[in-house]
Image (cartoon, rainbow, N blue to C red):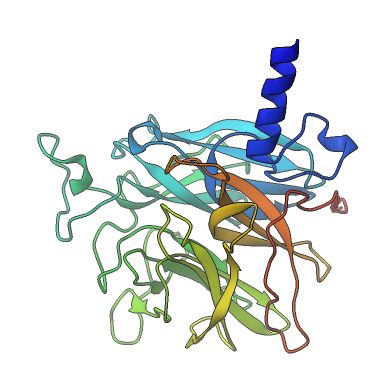
Amino acid sequence: MIQRSVLGLICCFMFGITFGQEANTNNNPIFEGWYADPEGAVFDDTYWVYPTFSDDYDKQLHFDAFSSKDLVHWEKHKRILDTTKIKWLRQALWAPSIVKKGKKYFLFFGANDIQRPGRKSYDPDNDINHFGGIGVAVADTPGGPFEDYLGKPLISDFYNNAQPIDQFVFKDTDGTYYFFYGGWSHCNLGKLNAEFTGFIPWEDGNPFKEITPEGYVEGPFMFLRNGIYYFMWSEGRWTNGSYKVAYAMADKATGPYKRIGAILESKEGDIATGAGHHSVINKPGTDEWILVYHRRPIPNEDRDHRVTCMDIMEFNEDGTIKPVKMTFEGVRANPLKERK
């Protein structure tokens, strides 16, 4: 009994959690386990979070999803997508991004960590990184199960030197579905076609145009507030404490975007390091905003030991974003109104 109590205290210290979450205010991380790159969403009267299963690449072979009615109590939906459903996927699926279109839910993801530009076919006798890119799966419900939508990557080539990873889909007020993506410090923007099978070319005939702001590394995200488009991304190295979130503002989704500054970053004395690859949840019908992100608990010596957290995000009178403070407390219960 004593050993179990001691073990419990150690877990609470390392992960910032307690066993009686409902009886206290320590809600970060929001659920147990190593998870990163979370995308938050609201579907009907339920909050959802879609993270990467944070482990070595050869073990990173599935997605779990989490749902909550109040942001505090989370239900785990196991293996909503895995490599058995994606025949062209051999390893490392990560950074899911979801959007609802009509009655279908489309889940976009990075796969196989493609490294070599120009290789379009998978060679089983050589490096599995020869083939990969951004894929898309589809389901009838936000909890899946999801099935491969195209039978191949949506994007497998390198455009403007951007690695095809870390995608985000943004539906604009005119119904356009903008597609932000890119690693290796390059960010591309495209427009999905009506079927989500490809892209509508820009005026110059190219499917993508580069919109990379200063400092951009990966993890693009966008939201709209009071007529202002907020473009956000991650900077630094994802493997250490330099990882952070920065942003820009514009009057249209296509930019241009000029870096304003970082709003989430590790500082001396913080409770965690390497906070980044985030998303944002807005409670419908309110001006309440929540930053969903991953961070590395202290102490931590494993590259893939990351946890998913939430903290309040607030704005200044001029629309700029206030720095977000990492906490163990996280966010309080905030149920959604049931939609009729």
Q: Quadrant of residue 191?
A: bottom left
> Residue 310: x and y, percent?
69, 53
On screen, residue 163 versus residue 196, left or right, reads left
**Total labels drawn:** 0
Q: Residue furthest top?
A: 1
Between 155 and 49, the residue placed more toward the observer is 49
Q: Position of residue 44 (x, y in %)?
A: 76, 51
Viewer-proximal residue, 322 or 229? 322
Residue 54 higher or lower than 312, as above or below: above
Percent of width and height locating residue 136: 43, 50
Percent x, y of residue 86: 36, 37
- Asked if residue 58 lies left or right of residue 223, the reply is left
Identify which residue is drawn at 59% across, 64% down. 267
Residue that extends furthest to the left in the rendered view of this protein:
125
Q: Residue at x 72, y 54 (%)?
A: 327
- Classify residue 304 by image quadrant: top left
Residue appearing at x 29%, y 86% in the figure: 204
Q: Residue at x 72, y 58 (%)?
A: 311
Q: Where is residue 260, by image quadrant?
A: bottom right
In the image, taking residue 335 as reference, residue 186 lies left or right, namely: left
Question: Quick check: 174 above or below 108?
Answer: below
Let me know if residue 192 appears in the view: no
Q: Quadrant of the N terminus?
A: top right
Q: Report the front residue among 92 and 245.
A: 245
